[in-house]
Image: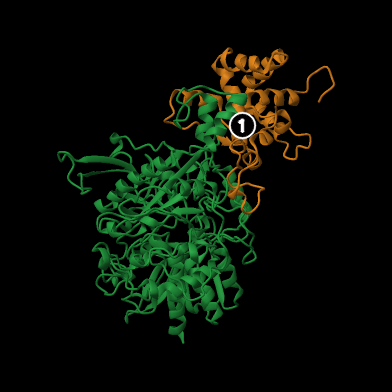
Chain colours: A orange, B green
Amino acid sequence: MSNSSTPDPLDQFVALSAILTGIAADKLHPQLDTHGTAAAYLAYATQQGGSAFTGLLALYAQNSTQPPDTIAKLILQQSGQATANIAQAVTLMWYLGAWYPPAGLAAYQADQSVPAPFVVISSDAYTQGWAWRVGQAHPMGYSDLRFGYWNGPPQALADLVGGS
Amino acid sequence: MSTQYDVVIIGAGISGALIAKQLGAAGKTVLILEAGLDGQGSYAGYLERFYLAQAKVPESPYTPPIVVADAQGIQNPSNPSTLAVGRPTTLTLGANWQDPSQAYLDQQGPLAFASTYERVGGGTMRHWLGTSLRFVPNDFRVKTTYGVEEDWPISYNDLEPWYGKAEAEIGVAAAVADQDYLGITFGPGYEYPMPPIPGSLVDQAVATGIANLPPVEDIKLDVSNTPAGRNSIPYQNRRQCAGNTNCIPICPIQAKYDPTVTLADALQYPTVSILYQTVANEIIVDANGQVSGINYLQYDDPNGPATRNGSVSATRYVIAAHAIETPRLLLMSTNNGTTPNGVANSSGHVGQHLMDHPIYLSWALAKDPVYGYRGPLATGGIESMRDGAFRSKHAPFRIEIGNEGWNFPIGDPYTTTLDFVLGTNASQLNPGKTPLYGSGLVGALNTALTRQFRLGFLMEQTPDDDCAVTLSPTFKDRLGLPRPRIRYNFSDYTKMGFVVAKRTATQIYGAMDAHEYTLAPDPSLLGKDPTVFSITYDSNDVPVPDGTAGATTAYFRYFGAGHVVGTYRMGTDSTNSVVDSQQRSWDHSNLFLVGSGVFPTVATGNPTLTLAALALWAAQTIVADLG
């Protein structure tokens, strides 16, 4: 969306998020973004994720012309656990509206008997969680659907998550 | 303010609200004392607290907050000794179940009482599901028919007209044609106030799958639409259900009935008033054996001490404070030693026979998508095994079909999402432990979530002597009042219901060609995890001692249904019950004890509709008493 030579950090964040989540950039950050989720998440991750998060954005910026799959593998498989964990925290933020500190994710990967700690980012974030929509449903306790909808099939997955 | 009323009611839940409304309509003067905070006008705050809760447990929206956040923002159970009005939470059923700095109940075991309640205007029905089943006729005569448990002093036919009145007040959506099973009858021309809530695709998949299932213990299983206290059309100035899949803990649009609806109606009468943050702490009995007053404490800060005390008097008294707080109040009321065993307790039965519908929870992936996480939390069930000859041998149960995927069993979609993102396998759905991203993540998660469903088997627990509410000699709340102490266990009859439930679940999944993922607890958890028990039985399903040659030992984890029942049961005799069939104390004729505590058995349906019917009946009796 930015025409300047310096990429817009929000656009970069959304493009990276689309690669990680599998949800189209124009769904994560629609032109008319009434919830402002992408901007809120960028701010939140910048604050909570510290240098790991800014490093993740820089790694993406350096490789943004690569094919998406190459970028994803570079981040998740070839740049160390700390980079993978911050990227996974970003993915989970979109899916669950919650922030999972990366150190907690690393601990959980080693031992699932102790739940990974998390904080719900905001009530708005909870209601915009993508996990439920990927399940062709809606966050529990938040729906704009109407009486009886559950008696029939849901909206198609492709319509919900966008992309090709 | 006057301190003399026709009736004083303790508790502003469903029973108290229904009775207050009936008395108000009859022009009687009524004062309600509610221990908790005002439940009116704070709906947005409840929703916000729910959305931000890390554990979206039934208590999570309500006040005072059941958790406090630490410096990292992680929410932990509030310390009940700091709360003027404490309450239990399902967050204290793990290793912390006997930690008095987290658990409100002083649980003595051997098993944990796993259900919880609210202390707030509107009561525990703030977080109810909405299930409004009538009991079946044999529930009221189970001793006579099957030689087990206890008979009620009333019959289904006695209660039938009151069921209809309760269904009108709650606003129940159902059709008579779907509900006239196992002997349930309706008055001539009766119709429910609203048409049924449509069934879910999960209900349809289960119904289709079991159509050709052979009978289980001679019982043909069928899926029934579940009567619900949710609006299928606009009713009582409230909206039609929009399927937010969140009846528990809170309907975001109040399409689900809760008792603040009736309470608001009651308070419209000029003779009905309420005091919130007012904790009854003693029932005063005079020399003639009549209740002559209620002493109470008031607090300003939910985290603070009592700031005032007072006393009120009335002609009739109604205790409607639930099956744990009601016996707590009765037992606390020793009248300086003149009622050393508490009020209304000449039988010694106050606090005895605490019950629940312990749940056997099972879960599976359907062959094809069933699209859970949509619609009300439950719209259908299998009611077929609520009654039958097998009741002489093991507990009956109803089967609730969940519409919320694996949210109840494993906390999904969180657990499975973490598995696919992180490459873990806590859900059992990522056995290759492959971390996913992009379209692979979307596809795997969609395949999992759209096929998930669960069945919950609500067991009729027997009324047993080793399940009781007493007063903790050790732990107090912020007001200095003793917290409830609980003893809890299951009989072999109850446990054998779990054995049959497990077997039945597996048969249902087999008939559906679904893949079962139910996890039995590891045997090493027995005696360590307070929600795990075992049962050993022979090839005829007869319980036998552990270690018997050829016998099978099964291990189960159970969950609470939120059905807090028993503890001041009704009966035919003052020596074996606390109240008579009118819910009047045998010992004090101007004292009524109402709510699910009067149930002699927990029966086979969710308790709300029955306790509401009984409350309406009690209201009529009280009006007649007052003349």
Residue farthest along the bottom direction in this orientation:
B627
Which residue is label 1 attached to? A93
Q: How many marks?
A: 1
Q: Percent position (x, y) of residue B447?
A: 54, 33
Which residue appears at 60% of the width and 29% of the height?
B442
Taking B546 as reference, is B21 above or below it?
below
Instruction: Give the side of residue A118 with respect to residue B329, left or right.
Output: right
Asked whether B230 or B223 is in front, the reply is B223
**Residue B585 placement: quadrant:** bottom left
Asked whether A94 or B486 is in front, the reply is A94
Residue farthest along the right direction in this orientation:
A3
**Residue B355 placement: quadrant:** bottom left
Instruction: Give the side of residue A42 with respect to residue B317, left or right.
Output: right
Residue B568: tell me if it is visible: no
Q: State the quadrant of the N terminus of chain B.
A: bottom right
Instruction: Give the side of residue B434 with respect to residue B570, left or right.
Output: right
Q: Percent position (x, y) of residue B97?
A: 37, 44
Q: Percent position (x, y) of residue B412?
A: 51, 38
Residue farthest along the front direction in this orientation:
B212
- Mark 1 is surrounded, within 10 Å at the Cα level, by few (under 14), some (14 to 19) or many (20 or more) other residues, namely many
SS at mark 1 in the image: helix
Q: Tag 1: residue type? A: Met
For mark 1, name the chain: A
Which residue appears at 29% of the width and 56% of the height?
B467
Residue B616: tell me if it is visible: yes
Taking B215 as reference, is A37 above or below it?
above
Q: Percent position (x, y) of residue B620?
A: 46, 79
